[in-house]
Image: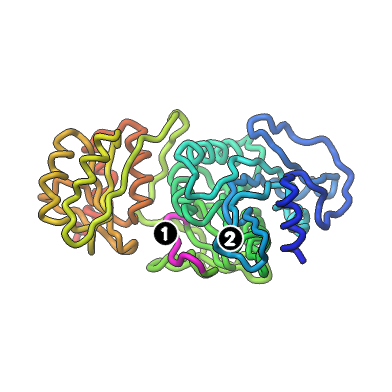
Amino acid sequence: MLANVLLSLALACSASAAPLVAPSFPTVAKRDNSPFNITYSSPRNATYDSLPRLLIMATGGTIAGSSTSNTDSTAYTAGAIGVAALVEAVPELLETAQIDGVQVANVGSNSLSDAIALNISKLATKAVCGDDAPYDAVVITHGTDTLEETAFFLDITVNCSAPIVVVGAMRPATAISADGPNNLLSAARTAVSPLSRDRGTLITLNDRICSAFFCQKTEANTLDTFESPEFGCLGHLLSVQPFYHYPPSMPTFKKVYDISKVQSLPPVEIIYGFQGSDFHLVKSAVESGAKGVVTAGTGAGSLSTAGQPLIDSVIAQGIPVVRSTKINSGFVAPSTNATTIAGGVFNPVKTRRMLQVLLALGKTNDEIRAAFEEPLGSYLTQF
């Protein structure tokens, strides 16, 4: 039933359609929302003004996807439904928080740009950081293809204790048993819970809560895709209430960077390693304007002997090359005789985001090496 209603909303192409099942609340004056370009506000009265204040930033993705078939989970159109329809499809949200919504973008996350990611981080900081912050928490709806990249970027650039939760769906809104509505409610309940403070940016899908620092997409199609393979999830949703397995803690080696003055993120390319690879694409990447390169190497980040001379020539031009692993899990440890920089605990896409931040802040290559290598290197040599 919900899928059919959402399909009708999508085909009508309206982000301001009437609520699906919304309580009738008297509306009171809204807060100043000029910094956020708010496009949706939930009804408010004195009772509901006592609820936590939640900003939902919508970017599109499968959670806002639509198809003419309710069994289609592969050929749908991502980002067809607006933030208002997403909220109004889940009336329980109105019992959870005072909600403002902003449509930051409406695309599949494979098309979400660095500029959009930077904007999301700055908006989230304005929303919840500082004594005069207008919101208590932020939820970001996002396509799952690159969700972990945006979530990690937020985790290392938003520096306050307020909860930020990134959420998506593996089935479009028009599908049978669409997972988006439950995921969105779970994200909202997680975001407004006091237990979620001081945990950094969180990812909530499929009744699990995991740290954006470690979480990654592990399966292309099924619902149980977002996991932290080595570190585990932080908690679960029980009857759509967050249950954490342990108190808040800071991931080892995590550092948060101030990007308030950053206007753009420099281009950084990821080059894939394999048997016989000579990494000739590294040269093409630099010639096309890349300011840094990440290698998704074999094993623990190893590079082929054939490719090393070309990589060294790029490094000689002042371009940092950071080694990660295409295995997507595990460590790339520092080596005393390596010209490349060891990426440590980060997978390739998170290594790229980290390198972009460091370059955007004007860090030298020595400072970039220290940021990636010193925490793990110092740990390994202390015994």
* Mark 2–mark 1 distance (CA, rounded to whole Å): 19 Å
How packed is label 2: few (under 14 Cα within 10 Å), some, or many (20 or more)?
many
Find numbered disc 2 in the image and state the secondary structure of the residue it sits on. loop
Q: How far from the left and from the top, in percent, is residue 201? A: 51, 52
Vertical placement of 221 versus 198: above or below? below
> In the image, what residue type sits under mark 1?
Phe
In this rendering, which labeled residue sits more in front, label 2 or label 1? Answer: 2
Q: How far from the left and from the top, in percent, is residue 188? A: 66, 55
- Quarter that holds the N terminus: bottom right
- Quarter that holds the C terminus: bottom left
Q: How far from the left and from the top, in percent, is residue 105? A: 58, 41
> In the image, what residue type sits under mark 2?
Ala
- How many circles with numbers are drawn on the protein? 2
Residue sitting at x 47%, y 32%: 260
For residue 55, say whether it is visible. Answer: yes
Report the residue marked by disc 1. Answer: 214
Report the residue marked by disc 2. Answer: 169
The stretch drawn in magenta includes residue 358: no
Among the 4 quarters of the image, the one containing residue 297:
bottom left
Q: How is the image coloured?
A: rainbow
Q: How far from the left and from the top, in percent, is residue 83? A: 68, 47
The stretch drawn in magenta includes residue 214: yes
Vertical placement of 66 versus 121: above or below? below
Which range is magenta?
Answer: 212-221
CB atoms of marks 2 and 1 within 8 Å: no
Which residue is at the front of the view, 246 or 89?
Answer: 89
